[in-house]
Image (cartoon, rainbow, N blue to C red):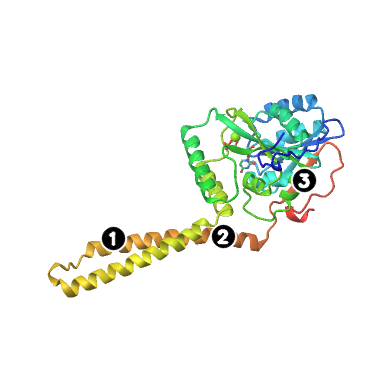
């Protein structure tokens, strides 16, 4: 058996370590929650049924990412009734990727899964995914065969985004994958150590390497509630993916700038020569001048915007603020020690 990252050595296949699936194995399931009150009951039912069927021990770490509805209240009640669950309450909304990062910094299992709260990624699939982990795969990422219940606009924009990202980035970020995946402890440890502030987790995990394999599945429609990714957040998330995984836009600015300068120079030369040699066809041309200035200013500001994105990334990383702040960790057992300080990379 080989994985897609190709650890085969010519024709010789390096055997992969087998990992046990029994009660000595702890499996951590990480779930971010933002205003998910409608879906919580269904989520807890499905997870409790799944945990009972698993051949391994499990812990579920829910993160309340500053919800403004009754998510915290409902989840707290559920968590206090079942020691399998722990609830991490963040001090405010830090965003999906930070909420997942917060949970990843707390997991204790040898194998870890990331799941969305809305049951779009069926939790039952974690069982066959665990089996792939047990066969020696380090990252089993869910790859969508089809996206039920998603708008044509979302499908089209996702497809364009992944095309641009694949073209721009030297990291091979798989298409049609979200954060739904099962990962080995080694991968989680490496991920938590990455200090960057704009966390595009699916890209960061692809960048890490290890033995990665796709797990094809059909994505369900959201079980209840509405998407927590409005267009504005989706654009922000896509830009994070592009700017933290590619420096090509900077290079393009330089290349285009060079050609435009050359063109501008020839343009001036052309008019000077025309003025001197053929004064009868020389046009004062206010309209063309304004159009040219408008175009050049447009390009200039666009480039300034691109520069600004990279400077913003540098700024965020230099500030070095914690990635998230934990208000409280809620669990049935009183075993929880003081929560970490939110600087994921300092936890290890
Ligand atoms: N989420 C979060 N913080 C946010 C936005 C979303 O923790 O600021 C969680 C949300 O509760 C869900 C997951 O991230 O568990 C994915 O969000 P959603 O299903 O709304 O995204 P979509 O599937 O529509 O892309
Ligand atoms: Mg969803």
Q: CA distance from mark 3 to mark 2?
A: 31 Å
**Could you tell me if residue 41 is visible in this image?**
no
On-image quarter of the N terminus: top right
Name the quarter showing ligand 1. top right
Report the number of numbered marks.
3
| Picture quadrant of residue 37 | top right
Q: Nearer the viewer, mark 3 or mark 2?
A: 3
Mark 2 touching mark 1, by CB under 8 A?
no
- The residue sitting at 73% across, 44% down in the picture is 103
* Residue lying at the far bottom of the rendered structure: 276
For the residues carrying marks 2 and 1, which lies nearer the camera in this image?
A: 1
Picture coordinates of residue 71, whole percent (x, y): 67, 36
Q: Secondary structure at mark 1?
A: helix
Residue 312 is labelled as 2
Q: Which residue is mark 3?
A: 186
Q: Which residue is mark 1?
A: 291
Front: mark 1 or 3: 3
> Element type at marker 2?
helix
**Mark with earlier residue (3, 2):** 3
Task: Answer few, some or many: residues within 10 Å of disc 2's Cα (few below 14, many 20 plus, some between 14 and 19).
Answer: few
Q: Position of residue 228 (x, y in %)?
A: 58, 39
Counting residues from the N terminus, which is met first, the one under dot 2 or under dot 1? 1
Residue 165 seen in the current view: yes
Left/right placement of residue 206 relative to residue 78 reads left
- Choose top left, top right, bottom left or bottom right for residue 107: top right
Q: Residues within 10 Å of mark 3 (few under 14, many from 20)?
A: few
Estimate the spatial distance between the alpha carbons at disc 2 and disc 1, rounded to whole Å.
31 Å
Residues 320 and 40: in front is: 320
């Amino acid at each position: 058996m080989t994985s897609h990252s190709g650890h085969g050595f010519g024709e010789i296949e390096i055997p992969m370590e087998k990992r046990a699936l029994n009660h000595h194995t702890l499996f951590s399931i990480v779930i971010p929650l933002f205003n998910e009150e409608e879906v919580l009951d269904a989520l807890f039912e499905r997870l409790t049924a799944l945990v009972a069927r698993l051949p391994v021990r499990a812990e579920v770490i829910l993160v309340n990412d500053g919800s403004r509805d009754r998510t915290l209240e409902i989840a707290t009640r559920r968590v206090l009734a079942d020691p399998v669950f722990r609830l991490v309450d963040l001090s405010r909304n830090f965003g999906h990727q930070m909420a997942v990062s917060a949970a990843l910094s707390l997991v204790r299992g040898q194998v870890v899964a990331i799941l969305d709260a809305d049951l779009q990624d069926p939790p039952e699939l974690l069982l066959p995914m665990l089996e792939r982990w047990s066969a020696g795969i380090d990252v089993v990422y869910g790859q969508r065969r089809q996206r039920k219940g998603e708008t044509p606009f979302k499908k089209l924009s996702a497809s364009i985004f992944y095309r641009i990202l694949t073209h721009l980035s030297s990291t091979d970020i798989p298409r049609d994958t979200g954060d739904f995946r099962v990962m080995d402890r080694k991968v989680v440890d490496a991920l938590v150590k990455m200090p960057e502030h704009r966390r595009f987790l699916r890209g960061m995990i692809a960048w890490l390497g290890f033995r990665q394999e796709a797990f094809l599945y059909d994505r369900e429609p959201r079980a209840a509630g509405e998407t927590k990714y409005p267009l504005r957040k989706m654009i922000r998330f896509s830009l994070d993916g592009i700017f933290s995984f590619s420096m090509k836009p900077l290079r393009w600015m330089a290349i285009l700038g060079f050609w435009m300068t050359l063109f501008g120079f020839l343009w001036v030369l052309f008019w000077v020569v025309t003025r001197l040699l053929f004064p009868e066809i020389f046009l004062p041309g206010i309209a063309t001048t304004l159009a040219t200035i408008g175009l050049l200013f447009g390009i200039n500001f666009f480039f300034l915007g691109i520069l600004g994105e990279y400077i913003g990334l540098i700024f965020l990383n230099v500030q070095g603020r914690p990635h998230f702040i934990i208000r409280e960790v809620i669990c049935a057992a009183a075993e929880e020690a003081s929560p970490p300080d939110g600087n994921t990379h300092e936890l290890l």
